[in-house]
Amino acid sequence: MTSTASLISASLDSERQRAMRAILQQPLLSAEGADAEAYLLVRRHAQWLKEWFSRHPDWNFHIDTEIARLRKTPADLADGTRPATDPNRGASFTKRRYVLICLTLTTLEQAERQIVLGRLAEGAMELIASDPSFEAAGIHFDLKSQDQRRDMVDVVRLLIDLGVLRRVHGDEQQYLNQSGDVLYNINRPALAAMLNLHNSPSAIAATLTRERTARLTQEFAPASEEGKNRTIRSAIVRRLLDNPVLYFDEISADERAYLSSQRGYLLSQISQATGLVPEIRREGIAMLDPTGDLTDVGLPEEGTYGHAALLLAEYLAAHGKENPGQPVSLTGLHRYAAELIEEHRSHWCRDAREAGAEIDIVERTIDRLAALRLVRSDEMGITPLPAIARYALGMLTSGGAAIHE
């Protein structure tokens, strides 16, 4: 009987882990379409998920008959190392694309059940033209520009990935080539769930954009000792769930003290709920994913750019070991990348052998390493962070766990 109970308990824990990983990986799941299986799994364990998210990271979890939504608040709202990306080419979204996302959602709110891509683009253009603050901020949108039409296409493809839009007829490439349009169904529940704010915009009296943005996401906690501990605990758990690495020198003294006394409990709760495995070092904690499927930024990865990223990571790891805390100049990295291109040109792709390709290789690699919290990029250059030591020459072995992101 005990053996049977243990098997049932292990099966329940495993299924809860899969539900947790599904909603962490895709915080907006629809009951229909590609997300249906994950949605059903999450719905089976909705009460446990709701309680866990409330107790630990203090995130709001909502589920109904049409969607499941985890409203995650990042530990650091100013962290720009993991932007939205073009679903096809992987390029980071620009400021204009982020603006277009918001304006497209506004247009969708005013639309009927269906809409075409051309109307979405026109709606964004009309909204930009009607508000002088866009021009003052340097935001322009012109449908005659191929690049700006591509921006609109990539925004729509992202909304398709998120389940807000469902393609009915046509293809975005036709619109891009000005040879056709695309018809979409609007997923109203998913559209309504996109907004993730703690406070209503209409209730905020501030006029400066930066101050208004801060107030929208401002969280309030009781001034009691219990309220203070809850705020500290949620900040730590958010970092451990959302960031590949938590560095001790990047958290406050109060947070370090709390983590020192509660580390065993917090890490066991996260590990049991998610399957992530903590790796504790002198400088911080990395949450490793043995399966790698919770990681959307990987290292190493296959192909020319994955190989180049690994070689540059090894170079930066060696530099960090010999010169702790000292940055490497971009010029130095470009020079080293050019040497790598020459050494590997016989088996690297054509794009990587073009003139000036070393600049693109370095940019892609630094974006990846910064997202994994392996380097810090600023005006001084590229500074290797302690966790990059695991990519030092000779330390990588096949089958190792990935730092989750």
Image (cartoon, helix red, strand yellow):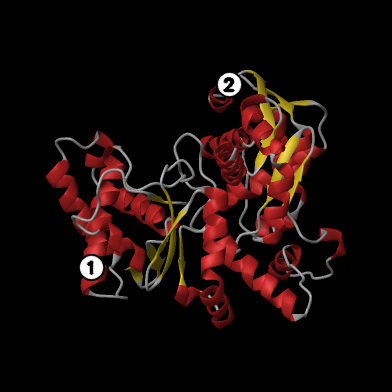
In space, the residues marked 2 and 1 are separated at their CA atoms by 47 Å
Q: Is residue 107 visible?
A: no
Along the horizontal axis of the image, is 250 left or right of 197?
left
> Which residue is rendered at x = 26% and y = 63% of the image?
317
Instruction: Please identify the residue farthest to the front as the structure is shown.
Output: 1
Nearest to N terminus: mark 2 or mark 1: 2
Q: SS at mark 1?
A: helix
Instruction: Please identify the residue farthest to the top as the structure is shown.
Output: 169
Q: Is residue 247 visible?
A: yes
Residues packed near mark 1 inside 10 Å, few (<14), some (14 to 19) or many (20 plus)? some
Instruction: Please identify the residue farthest to the right as the structure is shown.
Output: 203
Number of numbered markers: 2
Residue 8 at x, y percent in the picture: 60, 37
Q: Nearer the viewer, residue 32 or 91?
A: 32
Check residue 319 in the rendering and tell me which mark sits there, or answer none: 1
Residues packed near mark 2 inside 10 Å, few (<14), some (14 to 19) or many (20 plus)? some
Q: Nearer the viewer, residue 130 or 182?
A: 182
What residue is pinned by disc 2? Answer: 171
**Vertical comparison of 171 with 326: above or below:** above
> Which residue is rendered at x = 59% and y = 61% of the image?
238
Q: SS at mark 2?
A: loop
Along the horizontal axis of the image, is 281 left or right of 344?
right
Q: Nearer the viewer, mark 2 or mark 1?
A: 1
Snapshot quadrant of residue 64 = top right
Snapshot quadrant of residue 204 = bottom right
Amino acid, disc 2: Asp
Residue 247 at x, y percent in the picture: 45, 70
The answer to the question of whether label 2 and label 1 lie on touching residues, with beta carbons closer than 8 A, is: no
> Which residue is rendered at x = 48% and y = 58% of the image?
81
Residue 394 at x, y percent in the picture: 18, 55
